[in-house]
Image (cartoon, grey):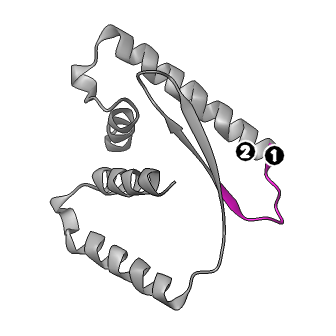
Amino acid sequence: TEFAYGFAKMVTHIRPEDWLDDTLENFKDSLKQFKQVDKEYSSSSNPSSSSIKLAFCDSTSKNTKEVVIYDSEISDLGNILQAHVESAISNFGNAISPIEKRQILINILKKLI
């Protein structure tokens, strides 16, 4: 139930106990979008090429921005940056929930795309 609660909050940006009638419909629409993106990804994915397809969905205007990110080599300096980011995140321990940590990383990723 903790996963479902966190997932519902992440998708709608609203705690489930604060949902309005239209929030449930928006949540269902988001689930349909996730299912569609997964279906498209599954049918078009090529096992020989490694990539990640991200779909950023705006819950208010129902706009979706899809970005494909291909695996690439990371330099030594990039590995240092990655280690620093991972260390900074782990240093927060349980002070920040895993869902919020993911949201922070997604926010940073959106800025870089």
Indicate yes or no whether the magenta region holds residue 47: yes
Q: Is residue 97 left or right of residue 22?
A: left
Look at the numbered disc 1 and give the secondary structure of its residue: helix
Residue at the outermost top position: 21
Q: Label for residue 44? A: 1
Q: Which residue is painted at 63% across and 33% down in the image? A: 35
Q: Main secondary structure of the magenta part?
A: loop
Q: Residues within 10 Å of mark 1 (few under 14, many from 20)?
A: few
From which residue to which does the magenta span run? 44-52
The count of marks equals 2
Q: Which residue is painted at 36% across and 17% down in the image? A: 23
Residue at the outermost bottom position: 76
Q: Quick check: marks 1 and 2 in contact, CB under 8 Å? A: yes
Q: Quadrant of residue 18?
A: top left
Q: Is residue 57 left or right of residue 102?
A: right
Vertical side of 108 occupied by 60: above or below: above
Vertical side of 61 occupied by 37: above or below: below
Q: Quadrant of residue 2?
A: top left
Residue 38 drawn at (x, y percent):
66, 40
Q: Which residue is painted at 59% across and 29% down in the image? A: 33
In the image, 16 versus 30, the foreground residue is 30
Indicate yes or no whether the magenta region holds residue 50: yes
Q: Residues within 10 Å of mark 2 (few under 14, many from 20)?
A: some
Mark 2 residue type: Tyr
Residue 70 drawn at (x, y percent):
68, 63
Which residue has dot 2 on it?
Answer: 41
Query: How far is mark 1 from mark 2, CA to CA?
Result: 5 Å
Q: Which residue is painted at 28% across and 13% down in the image? A: 20
Q: Is residue 6 left or right of residue 74?
A: left
Look at the numbered disc 2 and give the secondary structure of its residue: helix
